[in-house]
Amino acid sequence: MVLTRENAVNLTLAVLLLAVPLIASALGQPFYVTLATRIAILALAALGLNLALGLGGMVSFGHAAFFGIGGYAAGILASHALSGEPLLFDLPGTAQMPIIWLVAVIAAGLVALAIGALSLRTSGVYFIMITLAFAQMVYYFAISWPAYGGEDGLSIAVRNQFPGTNTMRPLNFFFVAYAVLLAGIGLFALIRASRFGAALAATRQNEIRVAALGIDPYRIRLAGFVISAMITALAGALYADLNRFVSPSMLAWHMSGELIVLIILGGTGRLFGPLAGAALYVAFEFALGGLTERWQFFLGLILLGVVLFARGGLLGLLAGKTKHG
Amino acid sequence: MVEPVLQIDNLVKSFGALRATDGITLDLMPGEIHALIGPNGAGKSTLIHQICGTLKQDSGTIRLAGEDIGALSAATRARRGLGRTFQVSSLAPEFSALRNVMLAVQARQGSSFGFFRPVMRDRSLIDPAMAILERVGLSDRARLPAAELSHGERRQLEIAMALALQSKALLLDEPMAGMGPEGSKRLTGFLDTLRQEAPILLVEHDMDAVFALADRISVLVYGRIIATGTVEDIRRDPAVRTAYLGDHA
């Protein structure tokens, strides 16, 4: 890899995110480990959305649905594993993260296929509104489903397991989340550089041109939307395990908005934009949230500043404009 | 008998009371450049939209190499072998010239669902794309984003992308638009070499280019073709002279 300025910034971000919990853990400050884990997981969720929004130009205002589906997959499977009751077709629950992740990703992928197939017939503001509407449907469904806690949500008594490590230790769970985030970033980089990535990025830039070349923009977008949802769902499963709790708030439209905010803060379409955005967001939440309950007001001001004066987000400021081959 | 590559039969399209396309019949034979001329508002754009599939005709048929493509989407028509350029350059502006042409090569190969192999290390995309950029004289601009190319270069890039598709028929929508006299002359020379690769339906206002290139000319006025013939036929046709050419001829 060539050491461009962007790569240097990316590497620094990755190393920092690893260093903070290591140092905090050595100093006996597990709270900061949890904070770093939260950053990693939110970054992964936003990374998923960034594939649709940044690469494909699809401003989905409904990604909370996929985040929450991932979360509920973790919560529901864990609750069945605990109670011993079979889930579906006599299949048992499980407390194994890899299986939970697989279920989360497949479930979200199927829902995204249905939502995307309908939503992508529209564009612009209609697309934003219809994805929001679908996500709200999922939200109200979760609220009115008493079997899994309804409005109150669902606790995960013991954090789900990952083979070879004790995930109840904060640092170990951080490593799991960090590794998944890095894998997600790697996947994003691969897809962006691939033929599919080229078609998706071109569809964002000029749909009519893409169609005139014989590439169906609808199919390209739909595939991008589904992959995007799957990554966000994986983050949702991790998020449920981080909090050991899943509730309809994971599915709420605030969550969709938060993911978009993360991307804008970090730098739309940038490989490490979601991580930069999540780090910034969680840092604000922590620093300002300690001072005032109205911290989101100041976050709003900062977001306004970014949109008005630093369109490339944090990565745009640090690493300059995007370069294309 | 030689079959036409593109055959348009009795095409009709109305917008309210206006018949923008009023029973147009037109064909494109192998190896020919067929120019379509007509004053502004004659319905050229509407006709192109229907041929490419961005507008649906009310009635009539469009055949490409014998196959009825009149109900297919724009993308499917392109895959069946209908290449086009746009009146106003239509490119992926953030992509380099090279990546624009590579996208066309990728589309021709029919494989946009590869997720893991980086395109910038894929010789099967880069080599043909570079060869085409070389042909249109853009190889030294290959790495520049399309948005930073000059107007004339963007026109050349449009043609490069159409060529990369190796289409059965090419539809060029005012390729000379906005080119200076020098540029037009060079482009005319280049298009002259293309007709054996793919027959061209050429919509153009630049009469010098049309008269230099066209094997046949059709004249479109108020949604109807009022004359079709060789350059000489059209120059002599009194109806055309009054309707369109004026003193130019």
Image (cartoon, rainbow, N blue to C red):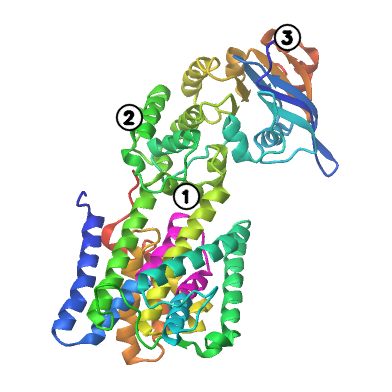
Examine the rendered structure and indicate whether residue A52 appears above or below residue A149: above
Taking the magenta stretch, the answer to whether it contains residue A259 is: no
Q: Which residue is mark 1?
A: A200
**Residue at image point 65% right, 23% down:** B65
* Mark 3 surroundings: few (<14), some (14-19) or many (≥20) residues within 10 A: some
Q: Secondary structure at mark 1?
A: helix
In the picture provided, is B47 more to the left or to the right than A215? right
Q: Is residue B130 visible?
A: yes
Any part of residue A263 in sight: no
CA–CA distance in space, label 2 to label 1: 27 Å
Q: Secondary structure at mark 2?
A: helix
List x then y, in percent, for residue B197. 53, 18
Of tags 3 and 2, the one toward the viewer is 2
The x, y position of residue A100, in whole percent, is: 41, 72
Q: Identify residue type, mark 3.
A: Asp
Q: Which residues are magenta?
A: A43-70
Lower sequence index among marks 3 and 2? 2
The chain identifier of the residue carrying mark 3 reads: B
Image depth: mark 2 or mark 1 in front:
1
Residue B233 is labelled as 3
Q: Which residue is mark 2?
A: B140
Taking the spot 70% from the left edge, 31% from the top edge, the residue there is: B44
A52 in magenta? yes
Determine the secondary structure under disc 3.
helix
